[in-house]
Amino acid sequence: MRPDNPLKRLVLLSLLAAFVFGVTGAAVAAEPANFTEALAQAAAEDKVLVVDFYTDW
Amino acid sequence: MNENAAMIAALDGALLWKVDCEKGEGIEIAKKYEIRGYPTYIALNGAGEITDRWIGYEGAEKWSAAVVAAKADRRTIVEKKAAFEAEPTPELAKALANDAATGSQYKAAVEYYGKAQELDPDNASEYGDQILMSMLYGLEDDSFTLDEVIAKAQLSMESDQTPAAGKLELALMIKHFAGQKGQVEKAVPFIEAAFAASEGSTDPDAIKYRNYLAVDHALLVEKDTAKAMDLFRGRMPEGWQEDADQLNKFAWWCFENGVNLEEAQKYALKGVELAETDGQRANILDTAAEICNALGNCDQALAHIKRAIELSPEQEYLKDQLARFEKIVEEKKAG
């Protein structure tokens, strides 16, 4: 079976890695433990919740 | 402002939360929000309703701009659609285009990006790129024909505005999708043009993409199979001959390009032996079946695919494959 689309990985992997490991660590001091907490925290602070859906390949 | 600083500034007034879609609660959340590719970003209001979403990471600047736009208009997608109908703006057109593209609604995405282009001609080139990307991905579900996409892609390939790395990336994508459609020859002019445009480029992205495309250049332009094989082997990671997924990758590449099939068959079968899970073994058996079929050994192809179904009965794709191989055998018998 065809391996997962190699092209999408090719284009995105290096940039994604920089993002996941570089930026969010600096930007998020205390990350909510789960989705419910994240929604509640965003609502309480009147912030937009931006969910980054990723996976480790 | 460096890239991190720009992104941190964009996140002022937003809360970023990351979730691995293949672990823990991420599996259910990804299902709920119909995640189709990685990375996908979704902006939500307090009620968990989607206010913005976009797929792919195209650098800090674009990512930060998307977050800023999400903060600036916190209406839901449904509300934004109604607002766009009442009074179109480029911001709404872009948000709705991104939403459509994230949901794999490529025709709608192209229409909205086209509207954004009309409403915001200063950024026509950026929207043009998005239109082309949506058309390329729209090939997968036949939202667009390969010829429609090629006509659009030619404009980008001929444009002085497209950097060498962009032309190489475009050639890679055209090759990928044309190959999927069984019309790989249509990629040849793109590969040639991208190689010519990137000759001597010192841009690291151009060098990286040129290395990737070199295999296709050798195979399809130079028609030098041995050179293509050497280049492809050289790109495989160390120890690949003892790794089931890598063996599958190598075997599939040979099958897809119709080269070196005997050796590919051996590697696929070794991958089957080394596979650690039934699902992985079934996937590699499918590769082995395709190679057997390509070599004219239809009975062995059937045996492989039947074993794959036993190992992974939930995969509908494998059942489609069985029906396909059975049809080939029947047609062969009928003469």
Image (cartoon, coloured by chain):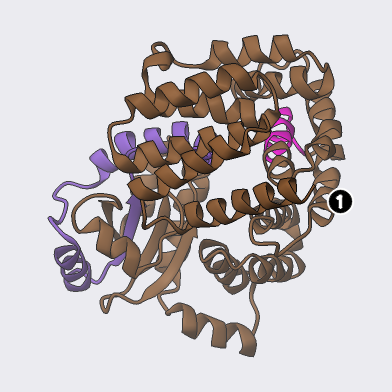
Q: Is residue A11 above or below residue B224?
A: below
Query: Which of the 4 quarters of the picture holds residue B262?
Result: top right
As shown in the figure, which amino acid type bears the numbered disc 1? Ala
Q: Along the horizontal axis of the image, is B301 left or right of B16?
A: right
**How crowded is the residue under tag 1: few (<14 C-alpha within 10 Å), some, or many (20+)?**
few
Chain for numbered disc 1? B
Chain shown brown: that is B
Q: Is residue B321 above or below residue B167?
A: below
Question: Is residue B1 shown to the viewer in this render?
Answer: no
Q: Along the horizontal axis of the image, is B132 left or right of B188?
A: left
Q: Nearer the viewer, residue B39 or B276?
A: B276
Q: Along the horizontal axis of the image, is B241 left or right of A38?
A: right
Q: Nearer the viewer, residue B277 or B222?
A: B277
Percent of width and height locating residue B154: 85, 44
Q: Measuring 57% from the left and 39% from the top, which residue is drawn there?
A: B299
Residue ID for mark 1: B151
Q: Nearer the viewer, residue B144 or B193?
A: B144
Q: Is residue B206 above or below residue B100?
A: above
Q: Nearer the viewer, residue A43 or B35?
A: B35
Question: Is residue B191 shown to the viewer in this render?
Answer: yes
Q: Measuring 57% from the left and 16% from the top, which residue is drawn there?
A: B263
Percent of width and height locating residue B207: 64, 18
Q: Main secondary structure of the magenta part?
A: helix
Is B1 colored magenta in this rendering? Answer: no
Percent of width and height locating residue B201: 72, 17
Is B164 colored magenta in this rendering? Answer: yes
Q: Secondary structure at mark 1?
A: helix
Chain A rendered in what hue?
purple
> Magenta part of the protein: which range?
B162-173
Which quarter of the rendered picture does the N terminus of chain B lie within?
top left
Query: Which of the 4 quarters of the picture holds residue B100?
Result: bottom right
Q: Measuring 16% from the left and 51% from the top, which residue is drawn there?
A: A31
